[in-house]
Amino acid sequence: MLAKFLVRAVFAALGLWVASEVVPGVDVRTTGALIIAAMLLGVVNAIVRPVVFILTLPITIVTLGLFLLVVNAMMIGLVAWLVPGFRIDGLLAGCLVAIVTGVSSWIGGLVLRDDKSNRR
């Protein structure tokens, strides 16, 4: 289980790094800040995001799920607020980072699923 968390954190770190290179308004100053942000993002997504998801469920239903992008941006904004050396300028940058890290995490999920299918 720890290995799975670490692999997901690596893909989150890759997504955050790519976002810092591609998305204007994202600044990661050190590799340490990037690693801490990726690990903290995993913890925030596991603990805080489900609570926020439940609280915002009515607006998520009304927007046909598009509000989840804003929820993901809020989680990334929370991580940026907590980690020195990691900065996000505004909601638009946060949404773009959420998209990039989401794609990176999706690719990571595909890699983990391939690992499971090889064991069978």
Image (spheres, grey):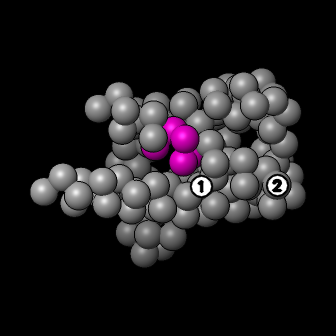
Residue range of the region highlighted in magenta in the rendering? 8-12
Q: Depth check: give the residue in front, 6 or 54.
A: 6
Position above or below: 32 against 48: above
Mark 2–mark 1 distance (CA, rounded to whole Å): 12 Å
Residue at image point 30% right, 54% down? 115
The amino acid marked with disc number 2 is Glu
Q: Depth check: give the residue in front, 54 or 34.
A: 34
Measured as percent of width and height from the top left, residue 72 is found at 55, 52
- 17 with respect to 105 (left or right): right
- 102 with respect to 33 (left or right): left
Quarter the N terminus occupies: top left
Q: Are marks 2 and 1 in contact (CB under 8 Å)?
A: no
Using the image, tell me which numbered label, if any, was put on residue 101.
1
Residue at image point 82% right, 55% down? 21
Please indicate, yes or no, whether residue 70 appears anywhere in the rendered image.
no
The amino acid marked with disc number 1 is Thr
Measured as percent of width and height from the top left, residue 69 is found at 55, 61
Please tell me how crowded label 2 is: few (under 14), some (14-19), or many (20+) other residues with Cα within 10 Å.
few
Using the image, tell me which numbered label, if any, was put on residue 21.
2
Please indicate, yes or no, whether residue 50 appears anywhere in the rendered image.
yes
Measured as percent of width and height from the top left, residue 78 is found at 63, 35
Residue at image point 64% right, 61% down? 100
Q: Depth check: give the residue in front, 69 or 106.
A: 106
Dot 2: what SS?
A: helix
Measured as percent of width and height from the top left, residue 52 is found at 44, 44
Dot 1: what SS?
A: helix
Please tell me how crowded label 1 is: few (under 14), some (14-19), or many (20+) other residues with Cα within 10 Å.
many
Residue at image point 79% right, 50% down? 20
